[in-house]
Image (cartoon, rainbow, N blue to C red):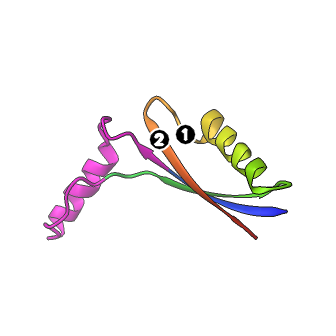
Amino acid sequence: MKYLATIQVMPKTEILDPQGKAVMLGLTNLGVRQVSNVRVGKNITLEIDAKDELEAKKEVDLACQKLLANLIMESFTYQIVQL
């Protein structure tokens, strides 16, 4: 079966996010003042061929832990849907 995984990788909350700070400064300079605590991350989609959803989840976990997320500074979440 084919699955689509949507992965969100974000800096851990205790880690300084310089990109988020830059975006926040830019928004403030543009007059958007009601925004706070901007965090910038990555959104990744993968199509996976797997026999079932459990196998697809194992593949996504492996990909995230080995390559897609730096587990020292980032955390990840994902959703899997069957195509």
Q: Quadrant of the C terminus?
A: bottom right
In the rendered structure, the answer to whether residue 24 lies left or right of residue 11 reads left
Looking at the image, is 19 positioned above or below residue 32? above
Residue placed under numbered mark 2 in the picture: 75
In the rendered structure, the answer to whether residue 24 lies left or right of residue 1 reads left
The quadrant in which residue 31 appears is: bottom left
Q: CA distance from mark 2 to mark 1?
A: 7 Å
* 12 vs 40, nearest the viewer: 12
Q: Position of residue 10 (x, y in %)?
A: 43, 47
Q: Residue at x 86, y 54 (%)?
A: 51
Looking at the image, is 67 positioned above or below residue 54? above
Q: Secondary structure at mark 2?
A: strand
Q: Are marks 2 and 1 in contact (CB under 8 Å)?
A: yes
Query: Which stretch is magenta?
Result: 9-38
Q: Position of residue 65 (x, y in %)?
A: 61, 35
Residue placed under numbered mark 1 in the picture: 69
The quadrant in which residue 53 appears is: bottom right
In the rendered structure, the answer to whether residue 45 lies left or right of residue 59 reads left
Q: Residue at x 72, y 43 (%)?
A: 58
Q: Position of residue 9 (x, y in %)?
A: 49, 48
Q: Residue at x 28, y 56 (%)?
A: 23
Is 16 magenta? The answer is: yes
> Going from the N terminus, do you reach mark 2 or mark 1 first?
1
Q: Position of residue 2 (x, y in %)?
A: 81, 63
Type of residue at label 2? Ser
Q: Residue at x 33, y 51 (%)?
A: 39
Check disc 2: other Cα within 10 Å, few if <14, some if 14-19, many if 20+.
some
Is 10 magenta? The answer is: yes
Q: Secondary structure at mark 1?
A: loop
Type of residue at label 1? Ala
**Residue 24 circle label:** none
Looking at the image, is 63 positioned above or below residue 52? above
